[in-house]
Amino acid sequence: MRLAKDHSLVAWIGTGVMGRSMAGHLQKAGWRLIVHNRTKDKADDLLRAGAQWASGAGEAAARADAVFTMVGFPHDVREVYLGQGGIVERAKPGALLVDMTTSEPTLAADIARAAEARGLRALDAPVSGGDIGAREARLSIMVGGDAEAFAAARPFFEIMGKQIVHHDGPGAGQHAKMCNQMNVAATMMGVVEALLYAKKAGLDPARMIESVGSGAASSWSLVNYGPRILRGDFNPGFYVRHFIKDMDIALAEAKKMNLPTPCLELARDLYQKVVDLGGDNLGIQALYLAMEKM
Ligand code: NAP
């Protein structure tokens, strides 16, 4: 099926922190959208700008030629794709299905198999770059699945992101995202520890970020989350509950590979302290709140 702006309808499921910006870029680029989100008012901006509303993911898929999903957890992904009356059951033959949620590699493979059996084309395409990357259309998009489906999806990815890499077959995008999350886990610990050290040593932490953030120890986490921590802004961004979900997926995958992951295990323990403080719905920079209490 050839996708074109004049005759194709694009379904977008999940209009939270990330999804609403990403879908907005497709809309601004001229794609006609049909949207669904569990909480309808989070789709208001897209609806006001002309998107159609669907009362469920399956209903949206039944009317669309390409379906993008950006929901929260693997159980949400399973429900919208494989649940009764879901996307795989109701999508049009030949439709392109793209899950951009950070989810399990094995679930991505299950969806790809179920989709193929119905003559659909499915990709896993999780992203990195945070809420800012989504807003500024600067995401890094890590894709798993069939090469032909990737070629069909690429024009959409180019609207939402800057770095687009096709890794391998189904699930490979999710594996690449797990590598991303392992790096985030390690850098967040370093960022918070260095900020606490700077404070104790009597440095101006903002100036520390300025100099370290321009050297070899710079990281996205330091440059983007460091200033938020200094402002006392612990809002998401990227929810602690989602990061815990990602670390648990990566730990489970590493265990299957017999791979020791001491850094990730330490980060998981430290983030448990954030949860124990009631911080599940804060942004991941809230690691600072837990580590300053240690
Ligand atoms: P979010 O704000 O919670 O957005 C997820 C949206 O999906 C919510 O609005 C939620 O509805 C909706 N949803 C969940 N299950 C649904 C279902 N079954 N049917 C319909 N809608 C459903 O989270 P986010 O920050 O955008 O993150 C989305 C995904 O991207 C997560 O997997 C996260 O790990 C990943 N990610 C996030 C970031 C980041 O910086 N935020 C960066 C990279 C990747 P409600 O509004 O009712 O909750």
Image (cartoon, helix red, strand yellow):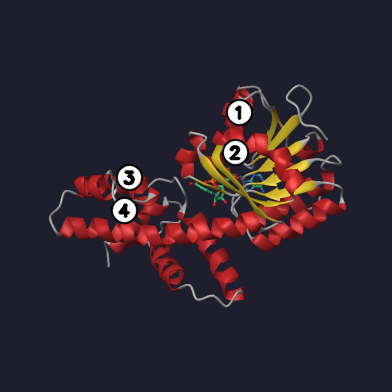
In whole angstroms, how far apart are the C-alphas of marks 4 and 1?
41 Å
Residue lying at 21% horizontally and 60% vertically, measured from the top left:
197
Do the CB atoms of the residues marked 4 and 2 lie less than 8 Å apart? no
Q: Position of residue 176 (x, y in %)?
A: 57, 57
- Whether residue 16 is visible: no
Give the residue type at disc 2. Answer: Thr
Q: Is mark 2 within 8 Å of ligand 1?
A: yes
- Whole-number angstrom distance, CA of label 4 to CA of label 3: 21 Å
- Left of 253 or right of it: where is 240? left
Tell me the CA gap for discs 3 and 1. Answer: 28 Å
Describe the element under mark 1 as helix, strand or loop.
helix
Q: Are marks 2 and 1 in contact (CB under 8 Å)?
A: yes
Q: Quadrant of residue 59?
A: top right
Q: Residues within 10 Å of mark 1 (few under 14, many from 20)?
A: many
Residue occupied by mark 4: 216
Q: Earlier in the sequence, mark 4 or mark 2?
A: 2
Residue 46 image label: 1
The alpha-carbon separation of the residues under discs 3 and 2 comes to 24 Å
On the image, the x and y values in percent for residue 111 come to 75, 55
- Residue at the disc numbered 3: 228
Instruction: Residue 15: give its label.
Output: 2
